Image (tube, rainbow, N blue to C red):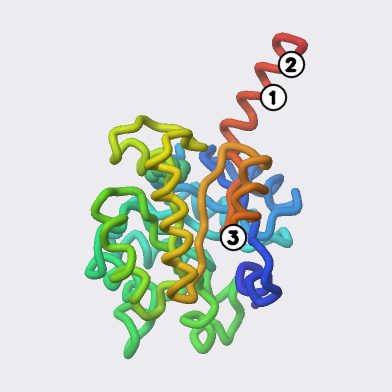
Amino acid sequence: RNNNIRDVWAKGEAVVSAWLSIGNAYTAEIAGWSGYDCVLVDLQHGMTDVQTMIAMLQAISATPATPIVRVPSCDPAAIMKALDAGAFGIICPMINNAREAEAFVAATRYPPLGNRSFGPARGLLYGGADYFAHADASIVRLGMIETREGLEALDEILAIDGLDGIFVGPNDLGLAMGKGTLGDPTDEAVREAILRCLSAARAHGKHAGIFCPSSAVAARRSGEGFDFVVPNSDANLLKSALIAEATGA
Ligand code: 3PY
Ligand code: MG
């Protein structure tokens, strides 16, 4: 089973991911048929439990999009559960240092490279009978940079073998820098910090992703060199569409 993320990167292009905060298999299926390279189930801030995540991953499996998960934390058990449920990529929030990045990557790789426990469940169904042979190479791992500590430790985090790259959380990063939360930060220091994440990733030959509040911002970010962009979330899109219909605007 291919991983669209790696296929898009191999072409030198930017991956465009949908982002699901609503815990529902039908909306996941709709997202999967909407032209995104991958569809992310958010277990950190999304209104989704593990059982619903499994149904969402099943729904995404029936579409051309690659299923991925943002886990709630660096907890190895949560990471392994998402992979066993068929996620082909993991975004791990709040990576602060090399030790956390290393633990994250280890939880996604089978021994001898890592410490992922064997029991691939849906991974074996979605990934195919040869899942075990290819899982370590095909799974994508992005560590989130969204704290002061993470920003300061960019180089040591990016040096971790097996980490594909970083994913910037502009809201938490702005908050950590005392500048409030904005999906597209206007503060000069936060903007500079985001671009520092991008240049550090490039210097290490790794990938850089970022959450964006709209497709216009996502297009600007991919123009800057980010090669994994998320233009908005299902909940925000639904809300703005509902407001527009309610007001007739
Ligand atoms: C952030 O902006 O902090 C995120 O985690 C992405 O939404
Ligand atoms: Mg965040």
Q: Quadrant of the N terminus?
A: bottom right
Q: Is residue 24 left or right of residue 7?
A: left
The residue at which mark 3 appears reads as: 225
The residues tagged by marks 1 and 2 sit, at their Cα atoms, a distance apart of 6 Å
State the residue at coordinates (42%, 35%). Answer: 187
Q: Of marks 3 and 1, which one's residue comes earlier in the chain?
A: 3
Mark 2 within 8 Å of ligand 1, using the beta carbon: no
Q: Image quadrant of ligand 1?
A: top left
In the drawing, what numbered circle is on residue 241? 1
Residue pictured at 40% horizontal, 42% vertical: 190
Q: Amino acid at mark 3?
A: Gly
Q: Residue 198 bears which disc, if any? A: none
Query: If you read the primary sequence from the N terminus, does the residue marked by circle 3 or circle 2 appear first?
Result: 3
Task: Looking at this view, name the residue that lies furthest to the top.
Answer: 247
Image-quadrant location for residue 237: top right
Q: Please give the residue where the numbered disc 2 appears in the rendered image.
A: 245
- Nearer to us in this view, 44 or 131: 44
* Figure quadrant of the C terminus: top right
Expressed as whole percent of the image width and height from the top left, the position of residue 83 reads 45, 67
Task: Judge by depth and name the residue closer to the eye, 153 or 140.
Answer: 153
Q: Is residue 215 above or below residue 89?
A: above
Amino acid type assigned to the residue bearing label 2 in the image: Glu
